[in-house]
Image (tube, rainbow, N blue to C red):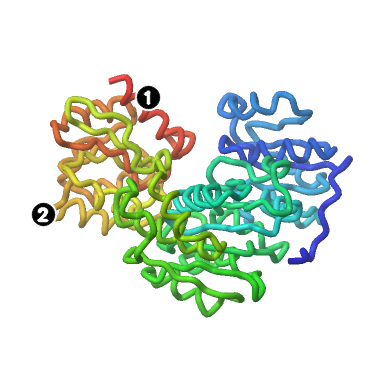
Amino acid sequence: MVHPLQRPDYRNRNALVMGLGLSGGGAGVARFLAARGARVTVTDAQPAERLASTLHALRDCDLRYVLGEHRERDFTAADFVVRNPAVPASHPLLRAAAAAGVPIYMEMTLFFLECPSHRVTGITGTKGKTTTTSLVGQIARAAGRDVVVAGNLRVSALEQLPRIGPETEVVLELSSFQLEGLEAIRYSPRTACVTNLMEDHLNRYAGLEDYFAAKQHIFRYQDGDGALVLNRDNPHTAALAPLAPGRVLWFGAADEVPGADRATLPGAHNRANMAAAAAVARALSIPDAVTAGALATFPGVPYRQELIRERDGVRFVNDSAATTPDATLAALESAGRPVVLIAGGADKELDFTALGAAVLAPRSPVKAVVLLEGSATEKVAAALGPRVAGRYGDFGAALRRAVGLATAGDTVLLSPGCASFGMFVNEFDRGDQFNSLVRAL
């Protein structure tokens, strides 16, 4: 596909990177631009001590930093700005830059302008995109292909460019935030998959329609040779089929999936993830026999129903990536034993009614709920009512309470149903702290 925009000229240009963060994308952008001769300023509202690990990783790069604040003059004086996906396009300083005629890019904008391979698969969805992306990567490797897996799984796509050739199979997990960067270049991956669409990020988007529209960038600019893999079980996803420029392939949790009978991933939601990966593999002309072998040996993904240890008959499971009530529901549905649930955190303006009904149901696996404090915790407490056994602003105290409530045969499950900001840097920091506390018991 021909890009309607030419690659930006970076050398000796004043580049402003807005949002360094700790997930790899901001660092990848800064390193990419510095290597191409740009004069790079990195600005982040967080202070240096909160960004220490990323700053250390960039210590060999010639960069200028403005940390702990953003300054309007840096935005209006730049030749171009690259915004972090976590920063909404409506940010006043981005509007000031646009009003001054400064182009605004994103990491994925730059990546697709630079990527030498057209063998690109993009995977998005409200739930399941990381597991599905990782599965597709494993299947493609098993098929003997040169594979790069990157995107919204803490792997900067830009930093992978030196590894990518014309025939490389590029598999990207793309969040709705990242997909916003494709609109400017009117580009979509040749193969796209939408795992499902559910309520999420209503603190960022005007409503579900706005959120779903951002997801549609993953296929909107395909041509007739494109392939779109959709979930027939999810009505919001299935409704996208008439909008597809190319062919549509379907999957569902009830599909016969090659190798699924030998796979170790738990739950109906992971059965759907495997079905999605198998459908994407068929779109990439990978034989089912290869898919079967890859699925049977897939070890799972960290922070997603990850068993950390068993102690005195109690299992400790890390599902920190469950940042929506629907994700927590999926974890409870596959629990298989009594649960002491650790939940709560930052608000994304989501509804906890269904989660509350499931937790309070007569056959619920949930014995008790320990809540982590955050802007959503009052709503969670109201929904879960009598099962709440305490609210804690200290993670160690919350875990000790959960351990005290659990008996042999139970699971202590971290599946917050909320974002992590406040007590934690991000959901990975939350998961890492849980692992450390559990291993120290």
Q: Nearer the viewer, mark 2 or mark 1?
A: 1
Q: Neighbour class for label 1 at 10 Å: few (<14), some, many (≥20)?
A: few
**Residue topped by disc 1:** 436
| Front-lying residue, 180 or 296 | 296
Residue 308, position as x, y percentages in the image: 33, 31
Q: Residue 421 location, x and y as percent?
A: 45, 39
2 or 1: tag closer to the N-terminus? 2
Seen from this angle, which residue lies furthest bottom?
242
Which residue occupies 80% across, 62% down? 5
Q: Which quadrant of the figure has residue 268?
A: bottom left
Asked where in the image residue 118 lies, by quadrant, the reply is: bottom right
Dot 2 amino acid type: Pro
Disc 2 is placed on an element classified as loop
Q: Residues within 10 Å of mark 2 (few under 14, many from 20)?
A: few
Residue furthest to the left: 362
What is the CA distance from the residue labelled 2 to the residue labelled 1?
34 Å
Residue position for label 2 = 362
Q: Nearer the viewer, residue 65 or 108?
A: 108
* Residue 202 visible in the current orientation: no
Relative to 408, 396 lies left or right: right
